[in-house]
Amino acid sequence: MIESGIGRRAAGMTMGADGGFPAQQQTLPGSTVAMTPVPDHGEDTWVGSGRLEGLRALITGGDSGIGRAVAIAYAREGADVAISFLPEEREDAETTAGWIRDAGRTAVLCPGDITERSTCDEVVEAAVDGLGGLDVLVNNAGVQMARDGGLEAMSDERIERVLRTNLHALFWLTRAALPHLGRGASIINVSSIQAYEPSTSLLDYASTKAAINNFTVNLAAELGPRGIRVNAVAPGPIWTPLQPATQEEEKIEAFGADTPLGRAGQPGELAGAFVFLAAPEEASYVSATVVGVTGGKPVF
């Protein structure tokens, strides 16, 4: 059997005794360069073919993880890309912007905390100004708090942060973007395997991801007559800074081992789903769909 380059590297990067990664911890929001191993975002493998030529995309949480992988792939497919990120994640964001510019495309940096409604408006405005318009919105930013136990241990602050980051910002950003999206544009939300197989320690996070599925289907029905497609991608366990920043060390050592493929995925392994859903010709009749990239876990 012949695996892709990223597939071979992804399998080789699961280094823990139980199929996961070396024990490690960070604090939120996490840093890419501090991870062992550093995730594979497709830097050395994604080869573009003009599938998104001339499009303008805003990717929230685009500094690292899945967002970085999508930004690299979009740029190499011919799109100009704006990324939003927390101000403290600027180092990661600058690295992502460098990959976008290396592909010969425009990179726009939109720092700010999207748990504030006014920031969501400002991020969209900065992206539109910097790109000259908007064709694709990728609602990727999200947060989870897996170390703090079940419902009785959840503080008001934790619940508020998860809901405002994962759900409130989704509404605010999409609402702000809609006046700039014309026929043929697309919105891509990020769901999760947690919407289908929720972990007890992630009650709040899993609830927001199930809500995102509903948001996707409902908004697709609303915007279909305007020629705007709305879809979602549901990742399984993916090796991003969010994991060492929110998981216990013993869970990192077995992270992803419970999937049918026996390992966690790398961010670059999701990029193809996002490119397909954004492509105006390939996915012209695809809307209200959730694409699972889960290592074999079912999304139905």
Image (cartoon, grey):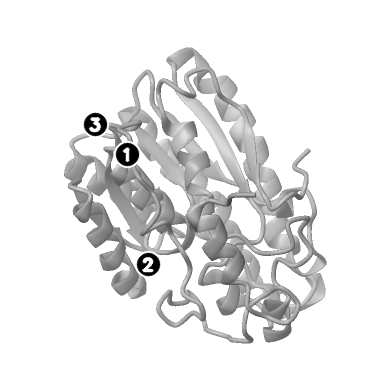
Q: Examine the rendered structure and indicate whether residue 94 appears above or below residue 16.
A: above
Callout 1: few (<14), some (14-19), or many (20+) C-alpha neighbours within 10 Å? many
Total marks in image: 3
Q: Nearer the viewer, mark 1 or mark 3?
A: 1
Q: What's the distance in space between the residues labelled 2 and 1, CA to CA? A: 26 Å
Q: Which mark is residue 86?
A: 2
Residue 165: percent from left, percent from top: 52, 58
Give how far apart the Cα atoms at labels 2 and 3 are.
27 Å
Query: Would residue 243 be visible to someone looking at this image?
Result: yes
| Amino acid of disc 3 | Gly
Of 195 and 44, nearer the camera is 44
In the image, residue 256 lies at what x, y percent? 70, 66
Q: Please state which amino acid type lies under the numbered disc 2.
A: Leu
Q: Is residue 153 above or below residue 261?
A: below
Q: Nearer the viewer, residue 114 or 193?
A: 193
- Provide residue 86's location: percent of width, then percent of height: 37, 67
Task: Look at 58% across and 43% down and name the residue there.
Answer: 233
Q: Which residue is mark 3?
A: 54
In depth, the one of 42 and 164 nearer the eye is 42
- Name the residue tied to disc 1: 77
Q: Nearer the viewer, mark 2 or mark 1?
A: 1
Q: Quadrant of residue 150?
A: bottom right
Mark 1 or mark 3: whose residue is earlier in sequence: 3
Residue 141 seen in the figure? no
